[in-house]
Each structure stands twice: as structure tokens, then as C-alpha cells.
Amino acid sequence: MSQSSVPNESVGTAVIALGGNALAPAGERSNVYDQFRYTRASLGPIVDLVSAGWNVCVVHGNGPQVGDELVRNELARYDAPPLPLGVLVAATAGWIGYMVQQSIENALRRAGTPRDVATIITQVVVDPNDDALQNPTKFIGRELPEDRVAELEREGYTVKLDGHGRARRVVGSPRPLAIHELPSIRRLLDAGTVVIAGGGGGAPIYDDPRLGWEGLDAVVDKDLAAAVLARDLRADLLLILTDVDAVYADWGTPQQRPLPRLTIEEAVQMDRDGAFGEGSMAPKIRAAVDFARRTGGRAIITALEKGREAVRGDAGTMITTTIESPEHV
């Protein structure tokens, strides 16, 4: 018999997008033991929602980790055959999923609300002709020193400055269209299992007319993948946890100010006006808008440490179809 203890009445379904930097903070050369420690510290909002009776699916990023895997591949390429980027996405989803899964299960046991926890290596359907594959914008890996930037650019890779002014590698990031393992994820959630899915945005695949499902060397944005998953699950809440406490107007200027709530129309207009950085906040806004528009649910963007308050409506930026605040958890 399963050890799960599922409440009689579920509050709803929540999809939580956990940034890869939550597990390996920017600017730190964290090893796997550090990442276990950061993972355990990141679970407050997840434990709160599960304890309140929600069915929860966690989607985690892998930007720092998949970048490290690329470096390992490059350093060892003369001793072991390197793995393509799409395979590395699946590989990091496996070991990060193991880390998150184990940490959530231990935290729920300590909280007195045990549930089964399972990781699904997830494939995400994309368009193989997506323009984004030819126009890299997705940041992966850590900050690069100047000499490494020059070396990568000579080898044909693209390096850009992220929203914090750090030089980092960028790769193609096609728009997610569907979650291939959606039926399996739904069955697990309906049974009360906490699911880790869409790790690293999921491994991108397309349907080849001759070969069937084939992988691509790209990284899907995990927030956009989380929004597609939340949309197709008909979730009630999409919680995007990142490294800033809210969405800001006039970001990077003396006039910057947090925005507690945005309607879909306000968020779309700010995005059109270029208020959000590509490869950083812009995908989060687009994910939140797409989810709220298609489901009528609420999407919240906030910092990891503010997750608990944000779910109660006391922190972060909430994006909804109307300006009125929905009921708190």
C-alpha cells in the first residue's frame, strides 16, 4: 500500500516553476552537496501547498547545471564521446529530479503530510523549424571570464550579457507546444503524488514523418514549459520562483518599483514596450500571461524566499485576467 496521505478534498492543482539558480545560485561555484542544501532550503512553498491539500507538480530549471555538463563534455571530449545538448537536458533532469524528489519527500515526512513523490523525464514537443533555433537567446551555464568568452566565440558559440550584466553562453530555445507525457503526469497528480516533471524545460522533441519522435539540441525555457503543462492540466495556480522578488516597472533605473498585480493587458503592453529582458523576465511574463489567459487561473512571479507570502497574496507579482485579487490560499 502506498505511504501517501492524501487529503479528502484537494484545494486544486498548482504548478511550481523552480529556477535552476535556486539550486545553484549565480556567482557561486556550488558543488552537488551545496545544491542538495539549496534544494532543501527551497521547499517552503511546495510543502505549504501540499500540506494545505493541493496537488502539486514541480518544474525545475537547469541553466547552471546543463552549462556545467557542457563544460565537462568539452574538457573530456578526447577521452569520452561528448553527448549532445538534448541528451544533456534529459541527463540533468534525471539527477536534479532525484535531488528534488528526495528533498521534497523528506520535507513532507517532517511536516507530517507524507505523499508519494515521483520524477518523470519529460519530452516537450516543439517545431523543428522554430526561428528560435537559429537565434539563440536562452542563457545556460555560469558567468564566463573574458578569455573563455573569446574562445567560445572563435568556436562558433554565442555569448551574451544576461540581465545582471554577466557574460554567459546562449543556445536556441524553441517554444514548447505540448507535453508528451501529460497523461502520465495527470494520472499521478490525480492519485495525490507530488510530481517533478518538465525538468530543465523538458527534452525538446519533434515528430519526424519517417523516424517518429526525434530529439533536438536546444533548451526549452522552463517557465514556458511550466505554463504549457499548467494550461493542459487546467491548473488553478502557476507559481514562478526566480531570483527577483517581483516584476518591476522601470527596472534598472532609480525609478524602479515593484508591481504587486498586473492584468493580462497591462503585462502584454509592458512586454511590447520592451520593459522585460529577453532570456530573463520576458519569458516568465509570457508564460504567466499565456496561463492566465487560457485558464482564468492566477500566475505569480516572485523570489524563492518570498514564495510562502506570494501564495497568500502578500508578495510578488500576481497576473490575472482582472485586477481584483483572487482568494488567498
Image (cartoon, rainbow, N blue to C red):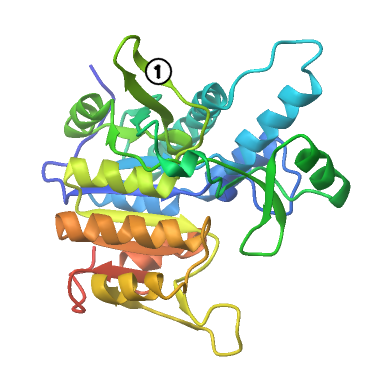
Residue 313 can be seen in this image: no
Q: Secondary structure at mark 1?
A: strand
- Residue 107 position, x and y percent, is 44, 41
Q: Quadrant of residue 226?
A: top left
Residue 202 can be seen in this image: yes
Q: Quadrant of residue 65?
A: top right
Q: Is residue 108 above or below residue 94?
A: below
Q: Residue furthest left?
A: 9
* Camera-side residue of 312 and 156: 156
Q: Is residue 166 above or below residue 207?
A: below
Q: Quadrant of the N terminus?
A: top left
- Residue 24 position, x and y percent, is 64, 45
Left/right of residue 65 with respect to residue 130 in the rendered view: right
Residue drawn 55% across the image and 26% down it: 95
Q: Which residue type does callout 1 highlight? A: Glu
Residue drawn 59% across the image and 49% down it: 21
- Residue 212 position, x and y percent, is 31, 13
Residue drawn 20% across the image and 48% down it: 235
Q: Is residue 162 above or below residue 210?
A: below
- Residue 317 position, x and y percent, is 37, 71
Left/right of residue 80 with respect to residue 115 in the rendered view: right
Q: Quadrant of residue 155?
A: top right
Q: Is residue 166 above or below residue 260?
A: above
* Camera-side residue of 28 and 177: 177
Q: Residue furthest right?
A: 147
Residue on which disc 1 sits: 214
Residue drawn 36% across the image and 74% down it: 314
